[in-house]
Amino acid sequence: MYTNNGQLDSKFVHQLREYRGWFMVLGILLIALGSLAIMFAYTSTLFSVVYLGALLVVLGIFELVHAFSFHPWTRFLLHLLLGLLYVASGAYILWNPALNALTLTLLLAIFFVISGIARFMFAMLHPQIPHHGWLAFNGIVTFVLGILIWYQWPVSGLWVIGTLVGIDAIFTGWAWIMLAVAAKRLKAHNA
C-alpha cells in the first residue's frame, strides 16, 4: 500500500480510483440499511439475534466436521465439545430469539457499564497519555449508555441491538463514502 518513501503505491491509488464509484454505492446502501434498521429496531433486533444463532449453529457444524480430522484423542474431544457447544448455543438462541435478545441486551448493558468504568479509571490513572481526556469522555459516555440500557431493561431488549447494528451500518457507510471522496481527491492530486 505504501512505498519505501512513505508515498501511496501507484497500483493502490489506481485501484482506489477504479473502484471509487462502488465505494460510494456501498456507503449509500449501508446508510440506507442502517437507517431502516433504526426505524424498525425491533425487527432488526430479532433478525440480528436469529443471525447470531444461525451463525453459531453453522460454526458448530464446521467444528464437528473438523473434529473428525484429528487423530489425537485430546484434540478430537476438544473440537467435538466445542462443536456441540456452538450448536447447542445457536439452537437455544434460535428457539426463542425475543427472550435471548433480552438476555443479550442485559449482558451488553453490563459490559458497557464495566467497560466505561475501566476506560475512565485508565484515563485517570494515566494522565500522561495524549488522548486521556477523550478516553475519559469515552468511558463516561459508555458508562451512561450502559446505565440507560440497564435502566430501561427489559423493554430496551426489544430495540437496543437493532439500533446499535443500524448505527454501526450508518457509520460504516459514511466511512466508505469518505474513502470514495478521498479517492477522488487522490485522482485530482496525482493525475
Image (cartoon, grey):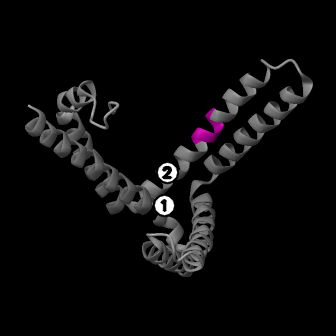
> Is 55 included in the stretch rendered in magenta?
yes
Dot 1 or dot 2, earlier in sequence: 2
Q: Which of these two is toward me, 74 or 189?
A: 189
Main secondary structure along the magenta-highlighted residues: helix
Q: Is residue 175 above or below residue 189?
A: below
For this view, does 79 lie left or right of residue 146?
Answer: right
Mark drawn on residue 161: 1
For this view, does 27 lie left or right of residue 103?
Answer: left
Image quadrant containing the N terminus: top left
The residue positioned farthest toward the front in the image shown: 5
Task: Identify which amino acid the numbered label 2 is placed on.
Answer: Ser
Horizontal and vertical percent position of residue 182 = 19, 44
Classify mark 2: helix, strand or loop.
Answer: helix
Q: Which residue is mark 2?
A: 48
> Is 129 included in the stretch rendered in magenta?
no
Image quadrant containing the C terminus: top left
Q: Residue at x 89, y 21 (%)?
A: 72
The residue stretch that appears in magenta = 54-58
Mark drawn on residue 56: none
The residue positioned farthest toward the right in the image shown: 73
Horizontal and vertical percent position of residue 109 = 58, 71
Q: Is residue 5 above or below residue 138?
A: above
